[in-house]
Structure formats: structure tokens, C-alpha cells
Amino acid sequence: MKWGQSSFDNFRAVPPGRGIVHQVNLEWIATVAREEEGLWLPDSLVGTDSHTTMINGLGVLGWGVGGIEAEAVMLGQPIYMLLPEVVGMELTGSLSPGVTATDMALRIVEMLRGHGVVGRFVEFYGEGLDSLSLPDRATIANMAPEYGATCGFFPADSTTMNYLKNSGREQSMVDDIENYLRANRLFRTESDSPPLFTSTLKLDLSSVESSLAGPKRPQDRVALSGMREHWRESLTAPVGHSGHGVDQSDVSATQNLSDRDGELSHGSVVIAAITSCTNTSNPSVMVAAGLLAKNAVNAGLSIKPWVKPSLAPGSRVVTEYLEAANLDGDLSILGFNTVGYGCTTCIGNSGPLDDDIEYAIDSADLVVGSVLSGNRNFEGRVHAKVKANYLASPPLVVAYAIAGHLDFDFSTDPMGHDSEGNPIMLADLWPSDTEISAVVSESITPEMYRDRYADVLSEPKWESIPATTSQLYNWDPDSTYVRRPTFLSGIPRNIEPIDPILGARALLMLDDSVTTDHISPAGAFASSSSAGLYLTDRGVSPRDFNSYGSRRGNHEVMMRGTFANVRIRNMLAPETTGGFTTHMTSGDVVSIFEASRRYRDEGTPLIVIAGSQYGTGSSRDWAAKGPLLLGVRAVIATSFERIHRSNLVGMGILPLTFAEGDDAYSLGLDGTESFDIPADIALEPGQNIPIMARKEGGSTIRFEAVVRLDTPVEVEYYRNGGILQTVLRGLAD
């Protein structure tokens, strides 16, 4: 990044430590509309993170893409997509007292994921928008990837203009933006008729209740009032999206903590994180967390000794208004100290648990929990040893840190007792909406934003990093962080014929809702893993491994980490969890990476077989780059998430879906077959192609699959071997 800033005239970087990009964009960068060379244009955005959609709350149309596609755009390639259907979601009424924007967002995620909006735009409309602040809208828009939509758009209106002014934009600029939007009928007013939509849903905001979502997916909402019952059921339910598979005889397992006052059990909350980016843009929930912390401290309460708390504001403005409201001290007393300004616990950067906590978890084989105010709670994402992860509002994060357990009913269980022995309930600590609004109004000013962003591009530590200016990046062959990738080396000038995929073996056979975190984890990794062994061989100490996310510039690490999530369940190695498969030639159960090397040496192409919603979650391009480097030529799934399918195309991997009504099980596939896929035919968008699967005994299964190259342009990408190959050949011409 520093090299790019030094070497390119049209590239600037907001230094690390200033805030997460989505919130900085909301508070400072975005314009909604602007003048360029005498012509006014609506603002738009394409970002390399799935939560780019947060800016939709400001009335800016934007969405996330994979890094592969973004790189092509920076090289002059347009973005192509099928004309999307637009789903309208009507909001009516207003939230009940004590119900937060987070609760609303979780309910919307549940509804829209159930409706099915993958590859579609969602636009919010209705009189309920009038009761939502701009940060409330941004909270909902941020979670568009969680409900599967390309974007979650809110039209600009008077609320938008007020936010622009209150976040420090100049009044004259705001007036010009409003005039432009009104002149082009892009400004929402109360008299507007509802737009025409492909389909519609309706939500009465007064029906929303306090909620969490988990234990493994954002769309699995749980009412706070039913959390105790849910937890007890999920603990013993079969292993799956909502179950942990603990035997009934083991539900009371505990482990004493010798150096702490207490013991761990199933459901102990060991991580409580107020983390970017969904909620930390919203002053109402951040102030609510601060006020709850203040009330708890005044009542003499503290968090449980086994809880690891953290606070990761979305920008430094958040820190300023918490300080202005005198709430930072109370959060700090409870342990919620600022750990950074960026992606932390939500992406797996939770850091290690204390040794005695990890020992207790392992000794009693405990299913412990985390409560975080982020947007992702996929298996293995938050922490490798934490199996039950719940999304919640920031004040609920504080509440669960004090309660210390998921098996807790806040309506009947006291948070503690006062000096006279009287129970202290959550209702006693929860701040009123009036109190929250007053603190927000008194603590946040336009000057706060102007002052904070006046020097946003200057950071002494960032400026001290040496960087050379050059047309090409100078790769360091000894670096274990940034290495020259192999997938763009040796590209021939002319397109080579596509070979059919013959005799392919399945590297993995996966169930539904496999996320990009399952495919390419971002968190820490063990020294015994393939990535760990690679670094150890190069003299890197395990304490210096950092995380997959921090080493994404090293393809050797990322390739070895592909499909290495500790919670991934590959049906080709059913007795294992976490990055193993059966090498069909030998029958050996080995790591995914080891199997891929064996198949490579044998000259055997590889495929992946998967269920529905394959590639949910992050726009992580390594979830496509990694499989390519492992030798994967095609993925056959019941359905794909939008960004991951696009990333596969961008890397030259053929995405295929089973015909409507079919899946691997209905066809009788078990993953032991060898597959022939006629990828060399003249492919057309959306066409059916025949696939033949040969069983070990000689019988065959023939079935049709749909080619998920959705446009002629994507067919061209695939013929070229990927989007960047296409662009580079175009530049050469």
C-alpha cells in the first residue's frame, strides 16, 4: 500500500489506525453526488470488501466485489453483470423502546435470507424510514452480504442531508447535492409513490424485539427472551448450523479455573467484543453500551473473570464522542479497552485466549461462546476454540460479559446484587431511549468530524515506513509476507484451447452454507498445520505466525490454508474435522494440501462438490485463488453466493450448478467417483452440459449441470483463464 501511494498519482491511502474503511467512507469520503469537470454525477462505489454496501445507507449505490475483479477495474476493465431483479422491503412504524438498530438488522437478515435475494438489489421504502437515523440505515445496509443481496439501498432524503451536515460537510456542498438529487428525482419525499419492484416484503418495526443471531450463521436469529431455551436445545442438537452434538450425559461438564474465581462450563462466554463494522458506525448503540457500562459500574458490577472483552471503534470519531460523554472510562473499568480501529474479532483477530482458559476448554471438551457486535459468526471464524458465536448489539455484548454465560435469562436472572442484597436486573441497567438521544445530541458535533479528518492522511508511524517509487513492485524473494504469486506467471500471448476436465477427483464434498471462511480462513493457525510447517521451515517462530489474513500476500501460506478451517466438515473424510480428505488413489486420509500435491503429481484434475449457498460471507478472493493453486478446475454446487461465483470465474475455475431439483445426494453421488466435464465445448451463458461420474465398480451416473458463466463476457474470461489474463492480453494488444 505504501509503495502504491508513492508510485501512483491517482492513488491515496488512509493510513492504518484511522478507522475501518466503510465508516471512514460514510463519515468523510462519500459525497452522494458531486461535480466532475463541469458535470454532476451521482456517487457510486465498488469495493473489495463485501460490507462495502454500508454506504447504501447514505443513498450511494455500491457493492462489494472480489479483489480479482477490482484489480481488473483498476486496469480499465468495466464491471459486467446481469440486470438484477430489485426486491422492495417496506418498513412501517418505529422501533419499540429499548430495541436497537442491531435487533432490527438481525430481523431483516432473517427475513431477506428466507425470501432469497442472492444476486438481487434490495431497496428499502415506506414511512418507517422516517424514524430511522442515517447510522440506523447504514447498520442495515452493512449487512447486505448477510442477507445475500448485492446491495441494500436507502434513497437519499432529508435525513441524508442532515447527516452530511452533522458529519462536517460544508453547507454549500450539501445544498448543491440536494438540488442535484431533487432535479433528477433521486430525492425521497413523503409524497413519493412506491417504486415498482420484482417482489416485496413488509416489516412493521414495532414488531422487532431484542435479539441475537447464532450460533453459526447471521440469519439464525434468536429472540433474547428465548435465548436460554435455544441454548439448551442447540447444545445437544445434532452437529449442524444450530447444533453442537453434545451428549446429554455431558451437558453438565465443568472445569475449575485455579487462578480465577469460578469455573468454565458449556455456554461460558469467553469473548465479548464490541467490534467493527456493523454497529460501531452507529452512535445510538455505542452510547447505549457506554451508558449500560456506566450504570453497571455504579452498581458495583464487573465482568466475569473468564471473559475476554475488547472494543474496536470504527473510527477515531467514536472514541472522541465516548470521551466527550465521559463513557470511555466506564467501558474501560469493565475491560472494554480500545484494541484498534479496524477489523478485529469479527474477522478472527480476537487474539489468543489465556492459557488456563484454553486448557479448561480442551480438558472438558467444552462448547464455549462469544458475543460480538459484528456481522459474521461463521464456524471457526471468531476463535478456533469457540464453537458458539452470537451476534448482538453493543449493550448486549456488555450485558453478556457481566452475565458470563449463554444459559442466562435476563428477565429472571439477576446481573448481580446491590449492597443490601437486592437483585440487579438488566432492565435496571438498560438506558432509556431519551437518555441515549440526549447524550448523542450533546456529545457529537460537526467540528468533531472536521477536526478528526483534517489530518486523516497523515500518520507518523505510516509515514516512517520506507517505500521506493517504481513502476513495478520490487518483490523480495525472502519475504514470508509478500511474494510474487504464480498464477500470473508465464501467460502466453494468445489464448490456448480449453481442455476437457477428464478423470477428475473430488477434493472435497461439502454440505450447505459453506462460507468463504471455511474455504480460506482469516484467523490464526497452528504450527502443526500445513501453513505452520511452511513458516517453521523458513525460520519463523510460531509466536510470529500472525494470521492467514495478515499473510494474504504470500500464496504459499494461503494455498496451504485453503480448506483448512478447523470446523470444516468434508464428507470424504467423515471421521475428521478441519482440512482433511481421502486421497482416493491410496485411500489415505491426509491434509487437503497433501492430497492436492499427490493428485498434482498423478496428473489428476480436481473438483469440489457442494450444497446450497456455497461461498457465503466475505468477498475473499483467496477463496478462489487458493483452490486454483490446489488444482481445482471446477466447482459443482446446488447454488452459489454472488461474489464467490464471480471470483471463481475471475480465476478461471468453472462454476456449475446441479439442475433444478437435483443435488449430489439425489443423484447418488458420494464423492468417490471420477468425473468427466466437457469444458472444451463452445460454452454459452447458462447452458446445460452433460457430466459423467464413474463409480469404482464401473457403473456411471450421467447428469446435467448448468454453466454459471452468466454473461458472454464471463465466457470470455473463462476462455482466457481468468479476468486478469483477459485484461493483460488486451493491454498487450
Image: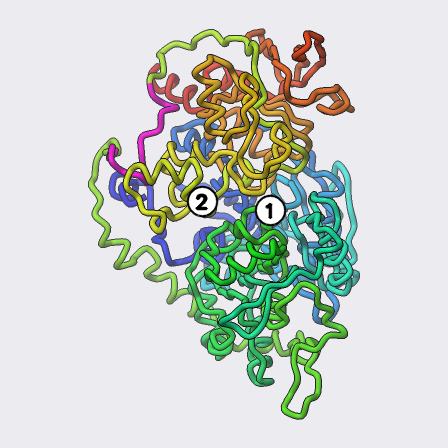
Q: Can residue 264 be seen?
A: yes
Residue positioned 75% across, 49% down in the render: 237
Q: Quadrant of residue 669?
A: top right
* Magenta-tinted stretch: 475-489
Residue at x 66%, y 65% (from the top left corner): 100
- Among the two numbered marks 1 and 2 on one chain, the one whose residue lies closer to the N terminus: 1
Residue 35, relative to residue 642: is it above or below?
A: below
Does 346 sit left or right of 612 as displayed?
A: left
The secondary structure that dominates the magenta segment is loop
The location of residue 296, given as percent across then percent down, is 59, 80
* One can see residue 691 in this view: no
Q: Which mark is residue 378?
A: 1
Q: Quadrant of the C terminus?
A: top left
- The label number, if any, that marks residue 525 in the structure image: 2
**Amino acid type, mark 2:** Phe
Query: Is 177 displayed left or right of 417 in the figure?
Result: left
Residue drawn 53% across the image and 18% down it: 586
**Residue extending furthest toward the bottom:** 420
Callout 1–callout 2 Cβ contact below 8 Å: no
Q: Amino acid at mark 1?
A: Phe
Determine the CA span between mark 1 and mark 2: 16 Å
Q: Please, is residue 595 above or below residue 530 in the view?
A: above
In front: 315, or 592?
592
Q: Toward which corner of the image does residue 412 lie, by quadrant?
A: bottom right
Q: Which SS class for mark 2? A: loop
